[in-house]
Image (cartoon, rainbow, N blue to C red):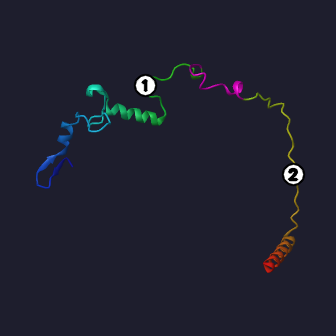
Amino acid sequence: MAIQKTASGKLIDMDAIRTKNETVIAVGNSKTNARGDLLGPGGKIVKTRDQIAADMYRQQKGTPLSNRPLTGDVQQAMPDVLPDPIENEFEKVDLENAPVSEPTYEVINSGGVDDAVARSKELAEKLKATRSRI
């Protein structure tokens, strides 16, 4: 799809036009060139499109944006962000000596199929009686 034919029949090489104009500042307020590089003051390239894409992929994976791994204890570096939950918010509980209560069970006698049929007949009669009043 590099060469396109116009309505008047002329042939245009679109890839040649793209590569020729990839350093031209893009129109609009995006502060990029036609290639996708981030531009700073004076049109200088601050970040290339490859660096921007790598930062986006790193951010999606949840890894830090810097190339350096985190060193040291994270809790020591950020004591306010990751407080110790046992000392600060929760009460210490001795689970080994905690009292255990036994569950209680209630036995329900359903009465069997005969009782269920009798109850359904009673309910059907009550329903007929209430419908006849309305």
Residue under the point 42% across and 36% down: 57
Q: Position of residue 2 (x, y in %)?
A: 19, 47
Q: Residue furthest bottom?
A: 132
Q: Which mark is residue 10?
A: none
Which one is in front, 133 or 68?
Answer: 133
Crowding at mark 2 (Cα within 10 Å: few <14, some 14-19, many 20+): few
Number of numbered discs visible in the structure rendering = 2
Q: In the displayed structure, does residue 126 sit left or right of residue 13?
A: right
Q: Residue at x 30, y 36 (%)?
A: 36
- Give the left or right position of residue 54, taking residue 89 as reference: left
Q: The C terminus is located in which quarter?
A: bottom right
Residue 85 location, quadrant:
top right
**Amino acid on which the number 1 mark rests in the picture:** Asn
- Tell me where residue 91 appears, x and y as whole percent: 76, 28
- Residue 73 within the segment the image draws in magenta: no
Residue 42, by quadrant, is top left
Q: Are marks 2 and 1 in contact (CB under 8 Å)?
A: no
Give x and y (percent) for residue 75: 60, 22
Counting residues from the start of the chain, the first of labels 2 and 1 encountered is 1
Q: Secondary structure at mark 1?
A: loop
Q: CA distance from mark 2 to mark 1?
A: 61 Å
Q: Residue furthest front?
A: 134
Q: Position of residue 63 (x, y in %)?
A: 48, 31
Which residue type does callout 2 highlight?
Tyr
Q: Which residue is mark 2?
A: 105
Pointer 1: what residue? Answer: 67
Q: Secondary structure at mark 2?
A: loop
Magenta region, residue range: 76-89
